[in-house]
Amino acid sequence: MRQRSLIAITAALAAGALTLTACGSRDEGGSSDTGSGTTVVIGVDAPLTGDLSAMGLGIKNSADLAAKTANKDKYVEGITFKIEALDDQAQPSSGQQNATTFVADKDVLGVVGPLNSSVAESMQKVFDDAGLVEVSPANTGPTLTQGADWQTKKVRTYKSYFRTATTDAVQGPYAAQYVYNDAKKKKVFVIDDKKTYGAGLAATFTDEFEKLGGEVVGTEHIDPETKDFSAVATKVKNSGADVVYYGGEYPQSGPLTKQLKAAGAKIPVVGGDGMKDDEYINLGGSASTGDLATSVGAPVEELTSAKDFVADYKAEGYKEPYSAYGGYSYDSTWAIIEAVKKIVEDNDGKLPDDARAQITAAMQNVSFDGVTGKVSFDEYGDTTNKQLTVYKVEGGEWKAVKSGTYTG
Amino acid sequence: MSGVGPVEPGEGTRAWDAPQADAVPAPEPSHGRLALVHARHRRAVFAASAAVVALAGGGYLYATRPEPPAPPAPPYPSQVLGVHYLGPATAPAGTPRGSFGFEVELSVQAGPPVTITRLTQPYAGLTLRTDPHIPVTVTSDTPRKIAITMRVTDCEKVPENAGLPFLDVTLRNTRAIEAHSFILGERYARNLNDALQVACSNDFTSSPKA
């Protein structure tokens, strides 16, 4: 009896093993057929060259990963997604040209990007006139979704514009609260680069810092085309400030912190998401130690939902890191994929003739668990997932020190 | 006999090669017995051999099978806890002047229970206490309402008109312990600022601890 049982178990195991082996073989053999059906192009606009390319390439690669994942999983039956990326060089004029190019290509049914709020301003109308949906993973300027008078009367201007990054309406005040209450800094020198993002962020920071009781002991605007900040550094040193707030991006703030410390102003520089990149530390060197930056979202590495993204990004072998906006770019791309899926399934498995318009309409109701958490949009096109993290430069890298969630 | 001489012995025909009739048969080597057994029980032996091979193969495949994916780690507590502002509430009877109250609701979207081990606000001129007292544990199926009473201790050290005030919360679940801020939004900011203005009105600032 025992012998028979043994033989039966062995046979079962062997049969099971053979079955598993057969299954594995079948999977490997049938995964390459993605050429049939309809190809949907998702445009990506970001700075792929120049000072901000570290962030831009992370956006592009992450969008590419989302498209590949959807294709591999055949997430939308009969649809193959393809990424076409254009370089805006962080210039509004280039962004507008790219927007026109995307609009002219009938296969483009959605666009991810851009990085810069100033670039977005130049693209929004072009996309909106064409009914082509745009989902930015990185724009934080409040006016893009809530209008010029967003502090007193929020008005959505463009129905085709969405974003997965939270806004400076939250980021600036959150930074001010941290600097004033946690870092115990009471006198700030505020510097910005005069651009939409930098000036806007500096303004929201300043407003909250003063409300809290902090004092602005000096303000200065810099020219983002230069890297000599010695005159500003001297002003900061003589101002009696115990902290500097910079509204702008790392190509300028990296050299700025170096020159501030060299001038004898041994005080931390604080900035926003445009500063939170490893390149800031490379540019600032040891002078960047102790500096702070807020960035959108919780640290991607700490999100359970981001585990697959981090592993898949590594497996794809992209040369550049996903940077600050990788997870948001993946989610922006996936939001477009979800919208495409919705309209295809509602149209008997085919793209409707007015696909662009339907995708824009469907985007408003998109909701899914993304890399960065729950992805959905409010009535202005802003993300409903509003998290922020304060990072500090310690030991040559950014380390998360505090995170916050906007639940209002 | 034919008179023909004896034939030269050929290979294998030598007389000593032939067994003698009266000779005792040499004992068979031991493997011969096994062979005999093999012959008698060939089918059973074959089946046993096949079973051993299959068992070894199956065991190998079983041992080297792909590991089933580990169960997903619980989410970080800050990713599943919601703190939602409900509105102003009457401060408990007997609280000192300069006190005011409001309520928040704590909820857990998914995963294991989350325990709030610390709940504070960031301003030096304010103190805070809760009902129920901290620590408070929240499960995914039952939101909990928390009454918060704040008291102004120094009007010089409270914000005049904070735009996005928040609560600092220390959270714990089976995954991690985290410090996290919850920014409760514009309505909380408005109500807090109103309450602070009342608390720090002229009558009050002269004796904030009355």
Image: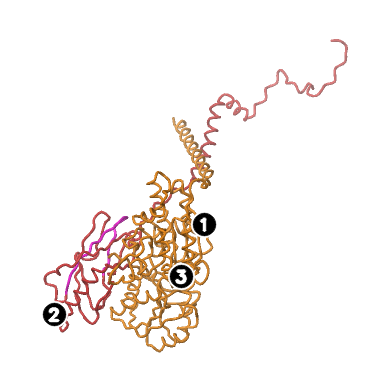
**Residue under the image location 54 percent in, 36 percent down:** B53
Q: Which residues are magenta?
A: B99-119
- Which kind of residue does numbered mark 2 sit on? Ala
- Where A197 falls versus A63 (above or below)? below
Specify the quadrant that holds the N terminus of chain A.
top left
Depth check, front residue: A284 or B93: A284
Q: Position of residue A293 (x, y in %)?
A: 40, 73
Between label 1 and label 2, give the one nearer the viewer.
Answer: 1
The residue to which callout 3 is attached is A92
Q: Position of residue A125 (x, y in %)?
A: 40, 64
Which chain appears red? Answer: B
Q: Residue furthest left?
A: B93
Query: Callout 2: 10 Å neighbours few (<14), some, many (20+)?
Result: few
Between label 3 and label 2, give the one nearer the viewer.
Answer: 3
Specify the quadrant that holds the C terminus of chain A.
bottom left
Decide which of tag 3 and tag 1 comes sooner along the chain: 3
**Residue under the image location 49 percent in, 40 percent down:** A17
The residue to which callout 2 is attached is B210
Label 3 close to label 2 by CB (< 8 Å): no
Q: Position of residue B199 (x, y in %)?
A: 17, 77
Chain A display color: orange
- Cα separation, mark 3 vs mark 2, equals 59 Å
Query: Callout 3: 10 Å neighbours few (<14), some, many (20+)?
Result: some
